[in-house]
Amino acid sequence: MKDVLIAMVKAHEIQGCIALENSFNKVGLDHVLLVKLASTAVVGQMIGLTRDELINAVSLAFVDGHSLRTYRHAPNTGSRKSWAAGDATSRAVRLALIAKAGEMGYPSVLSAKTWGFYDVLFKGNAFKFQRPYGSYVMENVLFKISFPAEFHAQTAVEAAMTLHGRLKRKRANPSMTSGR
């Protein structure tokens, strides 16, 4: 179980450190791409890929097709939202396994002029990083714990639930003061 937890932390850190300074949403890509990328790296390590095989696997994750944000927004919102991460993880396992079997990688998958990830999908911008991988994301980034909503909606949902509780109590006890 310790290995599983360590792998989960590594995957979360990879996703989070890349996401901190690089908006995939702004270029129309779904953030589930980061799940595939991080899972490929972590699964590759778990199955014992060499450094070169791991580089190949990660390059395959970048050259592999990527999900658009379309299914997360009206009028196209759909059930894929609930299985996209599982699909990305499944794909990551496959990419790590084919790298282990000898599939070649693509050394300039990110930076190749015209055809690389940066030019084709990231508006010509290279990734930016604010810190090395470690434990920052696990220790500091918001979690979706309280309510089944995206992290940026947590405060609004918490406020609505608090106000709902107060209004409910006020209806039950009309003598409550308005200052509470």
Image: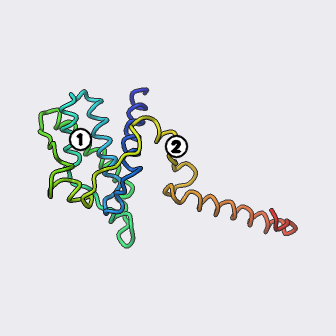
Q: Residues within 10 Å of mark 2 (few under 14, many from 20)?
A: few
> Going by the image, does 172 lie left or right of 72?
right
Residue 162, disc: none
162 or 63, which is in the foreground?
63
Mark positioned earlier in the residue sequence (1 or 2):
1
> Going by the image, does 123 lie left or right of 167?
left
Where is residue 127 drawn, in percent x and y?
31, 50
- SS of the residue at dot 2? helix
Question: Quadrant of the rendered structure where residue 7 is?
Answer: top left
In the displayed structure, 98 sits above or below 75; it is above
Q: Which residue is at 43% across, 26% downward?
A: 2
Q: Which colour assignment does the render follow?
A: rainbow
Where is residue 94 drawn, in percent x and y?
22, 41
- Which amino acid, by three-letter code, is at mark 2? Asn
- Which amino acid, by three-letter code, is at mark 1? Val
Reading the image, the residue beneath label 2 is 140
Q: Which residue is at 23% across, 41% downward?
A: 58
In the displayed structure, 53 sits above or below 119; it is above
Quarter of the image for the N terminus: give it: top left
Quarter of the image for the C terminus: give it: bottom right
Q: Residues within 10 Å of mark 1 (few under 14, many from 20)?
A: many
Q: Are marks 1 and 2 in contact (CB under 8 Å)?
A: no
> Going by the image, does 110 lie left or right of 2?
left
Q: Which residue is at 11% across, 39% downward?
A: 104
Disc number lying in front (1 or 2)? 2
Where is residue 70 drawn, in percent x and y?
32, 66
Residue 58, disc: 1
Alpha-carbon span between mark 1 and mark 2? 26 Å
Where is residue 71 drawn, in percent x and y?
34, 64
In the displayed structure, 119 sits above or below 89; it is below
- SS of the residue at dot 1? helix
